Structures are given as C-alpha cells and as structure tokens.
Image (cartoon, helix red, strand yellow):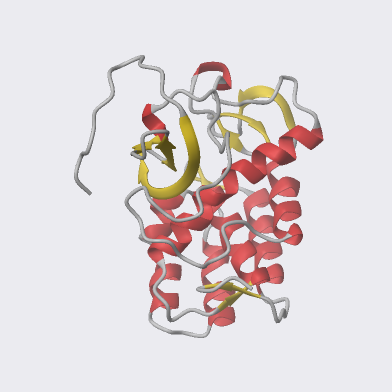
Amino acid sequence: YAVKKSYKKNQDISISCQTTGTSVNGNNIWDKTADGCYVADYYVKTGSSGFVTKKCESSGGGSSSSSYCKTINGAGVDLIAKWEGFVASPKPDPIGLPTVGYGHLCQQKNCREVKYKFPLTKTTAKELLLDDLPKYTKCLADYLNTKPKLNDNQWAALTSWVFNVGCGNAKTSTLVKRLNNGEAANTVAAEELPKWRMAGGKVLPGLEARRKDEVKLFKTASSKQAYPKCQ
C-alpha cells in the first residue's frame, strides 16, 4: 500500500470509521479519515486501545477482509475471565507486568489507553476484554492456513491460549504448525496445549489448570463454525 498522504504530528483528524488490518506495534486497528485515507490507529491518539467509532463496511488497512469470527463465544470469554481474574485498578500480574480488568496488558503508564473509568467494574472489565479479543483472533487467523476447520469452542479455546501466551509465541508454536499440516485438531490441542504451563521460567499450577480447561472447551462438540468462515 502506497502512502497517499501524510499528517503532521498533533494534527487533528476526523475518523469516519475503523477496521482491522496489518498490526503496527501490537495494534491491528486502522482508522479511515474523513478524506478517505487509512492510517494505523497506533499513530492516532483516540484515548482507547479499541474501537471508538463504527466499523468500516469493507476492509482497508493493509489486509484483505476475512470471514473468520473476530470475537469468541461466551464460554471462551468466561474461561478467559475466570483464569485472568478481575483487577479493578492497574497492578502487576504474577510475573511483574501491569494489568487491569481481565488480563488487559497496559500499553501506557497507568493504563492511560483504557477508555473506561478506574476502578473498573466487572461489567466494564468485560467490555475491555471484548475490545481486546479481536487482536488475538486476528493473530490466529494470520498464522493459520485454511486446512484447520475450527468450531466456535475450538476457536475460543485457542484464543484463550493466545491471549495468555502472546501472539509471537503462538506464531512459532508446534501447535499452529501441526494444525497447518492438517492433523486432527482435537489431538493436536490435547497434546500441545498442556505444554504451555510455564511463566517467568517456572511451572505455574494455575497455567496447568487453565490448559486443562482450554482442552476441555476445545473438545466440546459444536456445529457452529468459527474458522476459516464464521457462521
């Protein structure tokens, strides 16, 4: 994509809609300006790490549109919330990274990017989690080819895993490689997810238990497809 226009630092711009596209420093949201250009949301100060206006009808932002599910089902959201735990105001997690809500990793000092008022309620924390999820489903969609056919429970379980271990680790994982090779998804999940039980160089019982929950959800039958096409 060629550069069509440049904006000066601190210049006010009007955003007509937002979409998802190529990730820029961990932010995959792109803003469509009133003059029809797309600019990476990373460079625009909107006061939020999520969407602040309506979504564009068609994709821009350096990535073709895809029909995978951009979010996950309620069982997956509840699983993530259960294991991340509720944090009303920013504080370090078990390995020292500042988090808030249900596992939102702070991007700025004191989590200034969060648009919800502190202390968070469980309702606003859940909304923040829903704002964060498309980043992780996009990672999965970017790393998987079209061989894996995943239902909504499998998709949710994998999203919980990526949310926990990070996009970079997921990208280079044997789990993703095996799915892309066309191996049976339930077998891959049952064998690979339990391996991800360490943080900060230590085995954490909480991670072992979380992986068991993710495997259980992954292997729960469902007729609703989530990847590569969302039903």
Q: Image quadrant of residue 51?
A: top right
Q: Could you tell me which residue is drawn at 66 percent across and 42 percent down?
A: 129
Report x, y in % for residue 133. 59, 49
Q: Farthest residue toward the top?
A: 10
- On screen, 123 above or below 67? above
Q: Could you tell me which residue is drawn at 51 percent across and 54 percent down?
A: 57
Q: Nearer the viewer, residue 49 or 38?
A: 38
Q: For this view, does 121 lie left or right of residue 24?
A: right
Q: Image quadrant of residue 114?
A: top right
Q: Farthest residue toward the right?
A: 122
Q: How many marks?
A: 0
- On screen, 90 above or below 123? above
Picture quarter with the C terminus: bottom right
Q: Could you tell me which residue is drawn at 59 percent across and 70 percent down?
A: 230
Report x, y in % for residue 87. 72, 30
Q: Could you tell me which residue is drawn at 72 percent across and 79 percent down?
A: 222
- On screen, 218 above or below 49? below
Q: Nearer the viewer, residue 66 or 193?
A: 66
Q: Farthest residue toward the front?
A: 35
Q: Image quadrant of residue 89?
A: top right
Q: Nearer the viewer, residue 57 or 169?
A: 57
Report x, y in % for residue 12. 41, 18
